[in-house]
Image (cartoon, rainbow, N blue to C red):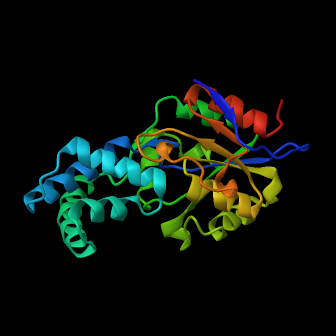
Amino acid sequence: MTTVLGQPRSYTTRAEWVFFDVGDVLFNEDPQHLLYFHSLIAAIRRNGIDITWDAYLAAIMDAVRKAPSTFLNDSGIAVCGSAEAWHRIHAEGRAVYDAIRKPRPFGVLLDGITAVVEEAKKDFKVGIIANQHPQILDAFEDYGIRSLFDVIIIDEIVGVGKPDPEIFRIALRQANCAAENAIIVGDRTDNDMVPGRIVGLRTLRFRRGMLYAAADPLTPEQVPDLEITDVSQLAAGIRALGCAL
């Protein structure tokens, strides 16, 4: 797969830390997204709206490309005809989805990502900055990867989440690291690249997954320093952006 440069800033010093997002970076959330959307279309159709799965998925993906932070409501309102109808139907479908995912409120570990983190640890300290449920810590233990991370910052634990830049600053304080000496590896233009740039981190977009990979940068602030589309190239991308050659 290709490695694509965005609008890279110039770095002359070696980075000290690499922070990973979780959803669609360390963990593959495609299964969760599909369960959610299939639960929603079932509720939509039960309420008398005649739409096919392919048409609903197309509406979702179109909304993601236009506004990734509000795509679910945008597509739902378009399909259901009004915000009132959508919010009622969404609550019905969401209840089914929550019951399905209750034993496992997170994705599945991405194939090949453990080796990427292990490779990064040869050159940097590594951490996590993510919007996740606290149960993700149990998932790290289940997969045997928790010990790889020196700092773990989860929004529901620290009380602030992306896209608020403060969650990045909390991570940097715990790491005792200057922003310019840290890299954020995330999948989202809005939640990862923008606040990362605001705080001053080096930004690497891991553009993968069925959902947010469809979102192109809409503003200069959303453009990463480096973009990688395949896990096999991610370790090399981190090393290059961190000047650890």
Q: Quadrant of the C terminus?
A: top right
Left or right, 66 with respect to 45, comes to right
Q: In this view, does 157 lie to the left or right of 51?
A: right
Q: Which residue is drawn at 49% across and 42% down?
A: 213
**Which residue lies at the image location 69% right of the left edge and 54% below the top edge?**
220
Looking at the image, which residue is at 47% across and 43% down?
214
Tell me if residue 35 can be seen.
Answer: no
Q: In which quarter of the image is residue 238?
A: top right
Q: Does residue 4 appear in the picture of this structure?
A: yes
Q: In this view, does 39 lie to the left or right of 14?
A: left
**Relative to 83, is 204 on the left or the right?**
right
> Residue 164 or 81: which is nearer the viewer?
81
Residue lying farthest to the right in this orientation: 12
- Residue 169 picture location, percent across and down: 70, 66
> What is the quadrant of residue 124 in the picture?
top right
Say above or below: 136 vs 112.
Answer: below
Q: Which residue is drawn at 47% across and 47% down?
A: 212
Classify residue 105 by image quadrant: bottom left
At which x and y percent is residue 68? Answer: 47, 56
Residue 192 position in % (x across, y down): 60, 55
